[in-house]
Image (cartoon, rainbow, N blue to C red):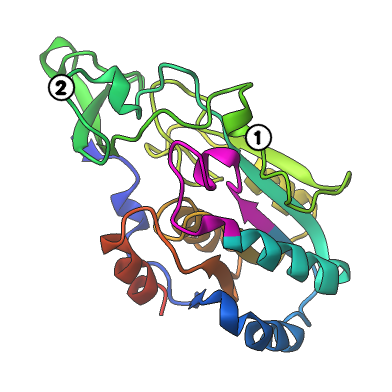
Amino acid sequence: MQDAFVQSRAWSYLHVVLVLFSFRFFPIWLSLLADITSASNIAFLIIDVQNCFLSGGSLAVNEGDDVIPIINDIRCKYETQFSLVVLSQDWHCSDHISFASQHPGSSPLQVIQLYYGQNKTLCQLEAACDVKYSVNQTLWPDHCVINTTSANFGGNLTRKTSDRVIRKGYNCKVDSYSAFFDNGGFEHTELHSLLQSSGIEVVFVAGLASDYCVYYTSVDAVNLGKFVKWIITYHKCNVNDYAYMAIYAFT
């Protein structure tokens, strides 16, 4: 039985630098950006800046709203440097497998094991099917439900008609932190093919939160051959214990 996909991402981060910064030092990082945007064909990936992760949301990242002026300022100053701007959008059904509400007796942030058969469908009971894959699943409050205001992008986030939106997590039976793959590696979004067709060589990543969706999106970008020269994210995480893992894995 394989611990599907997540472990295969483990330590292939040699070409990645993660920058966690405080908002008060933002002008310094902007000056650095001016020096490192000389590469051609750069994509700016904006990860999950949605109401559910902002203040008042059901899974709000502490001070996560502060990432919005950072992203907006980067777009204002360096828009011409980006060949492509992509926004990822968590897009869950109301009974999503990652919701603690769907597991009686469980609570948010509890970690459970999910089992999948050879055809990559969820086993309702481990003994009820031939288990081929297992996936660790952190349980979350209900969030970013399809066609609700919770799933909408933050109202103050700069948007343009040329932006592309990649939805993830819409499979009710498997979670998806990365904007490239679900957590089992069973299915992929259209993001990789979009980057390929656009000739993207370098990706910049920003958004929420650095310990989950920004992190795994960045790892997958590296594994798919995209040079993640800098990852720009906010210093707050959903689960503080993972912040240090994110820092050291990328440096």
Q: Amino acid at mark 1?
A: Asn
Regarding residue 81, the answer to whether it shows in the image is no
- At label 1, counting other C-alpha atoms closer than 10 Å, the crowd grade (few under 14, some 14-19, many 20 or more) is some
Across and down, in percent, residue 103 comes to 24, 20
Looking at the image, the residue that sits furthest to the left is 127
Task: Look at the picture and state if 177 lies above or below 108.
Answer: below
Q: Quadrant of the N terminus?
A: top left
Q: Quadrant of the C terminus?
A: bottom left
Report if residue 141 lies within the magenta region. Answer: no
User: What residue is at 67 percent from the left and 68 percent from the top?
Assistant: 70
Residue labelled with disc 2:
105
Residue 160 appears left or right of 210: right
Residue 218 appears left or right of 237: right
- Res. 11 image quadrant: bottom left
Residue 28 appears left or right of 182: right
Residue 175 appears left or right of 194: left
Instruction: Please say if the residues under marks 1 and 2 sit with CB atoms less than 8 Å apart.
Output: no
Q: Toward the viewer: 1 or 106?
A: 106
Residue labelled with disc 1:
152
The numbered disc on residue 12 is none
Looking at the image, the residue that sits furthest to the front is 56
- Res. 133 image quadrant: top left
Q: Toward the viewer: 195 or 70?
A: 70
Task: Look at the picture and state if 9 lies above or below 127.
Answer: below
User: What residue is at 66 percent from the left and 56 percent from the top?
Assistant: 45
Question: Which region shows up in magenta?
Answer: 45-65
Across and down, in percent, residue 172 comes to 44, 20
Across and down, in percent, residue 68 comes to 66, 59
The Cα–Cα distance between marks 1 and 2, rounded to whole angstroms, is 30 Å
Q: Amino acid at mark 2?
A: Gly
Regarding residue 83, the answer to whether it shows in the image is yes
Q: In terms of secondary structure, what is the magenta stretch mainly?
A: loop
